Image: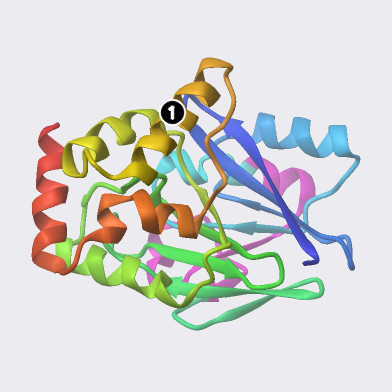
Amino acid sequence: MTVTVQAIPMLSDNYSWLLTDSVSGKVGIVDPAEAAPAIATLERLGKGLDFIFLTHHHGDHIDGVPELVAKYHPLVVGNGADAHRLPPLDIPVHEGSQVEFGSAKLRVIETPGHTLGHISYYIADGGILLPGDTLFSLGCGRLFEGTATQMFNSIAKYGDLPDDTLVCAGHEYTASNVKFALTIEPDNTALRARAEEVEALRAKGAATLPVSLGQERATNPFLRAKDAEEFARIRAAKDQF
């Protein structure tokens, strides 16, 4: 595995993700909500910035881009079909695009639902999934623009990824998500164990991410929905929770 990932906390509950290719030394940042925490992390590590990868157009995922571009001149990657709502793109991508990142590649997965132009990135040489606001630990994104069926189908696209894939989601929502998940599957022993783990992590101010995709498959009610209708019922219940 040549690509490593680490979280950069931003705003009140956002995560941007720092990607480093150990072979080439290339550095990328995913969804910078603000520039200052990214710059502080890069300076502490003595690194520059080669790429910015964007999952969707919301301000809490792109507002740091202009300052980072002005300082480091990285290549900005995002969904070409959503370019009118994103900062200027150097590399417009679409479903199935492979973005060269040093010795590795990021595979683009179109995952509409939270927004219509949302995309995710998967790095096989690192076992890393960057789902933005499509998938959270024990939850999924709100349907601001898409439908429940679209979101169900989007999450289903992760089905071919290995269980040990690291889910690096866009927000620290796990503590609230686990409370809702327990109302769906109160007798799920894996979920109850995850609830205890999350409580312990948050009590000491630690992140609940990354989390393995296998653990999410065992505990996340949205990943466990059998069909789009069940998914829609769970999403509607979460919206009212």
* Magenta segment boundaries in residue numbering: 67-92
User: Dot 1, how many residues are within 10 Å of its Cα: few (below 14), some (14-19), or many (20+)?
Assistant: few
Identify the image quadrant of residue 238: top left
Q: Nearer the viewer, residue 127 or 103?
A: 127
Is residue 25 placed above or below 239 in the rendered structure?
Answer: below
Identify the image quadrant of residue 10: top right
Residue drawn 59% across the image and 31% down it:
9
Quadrant the C terminus occupies: top left
Residue drawn 57% across the image and 46% down it:
210
Asked whether residue 156 is in view, the answer is yes
Q: What x and y, as percent, mark residue 48?
A: 84, 49
Asked whether residue 134 is in view, the answer is no
Asked if the stretch drawn in magenta spans residue 87, the answer is yes
Amino acid type, residue under disc 1 in the picture: Glu
Residue wearing tag 1: 196
Extreme residue in the top direction: 203
* Residue 232 located left or right of residue 211: left
Q: What x and y, as percent, mark residue 237?
A: 10, 42
Residue drawn 31% across the image and 36% down it:
177
Quadrant the N terminus occupies: bottom right
Is residue 227 placed above or below 68 in the rendered structure?
Answer: below
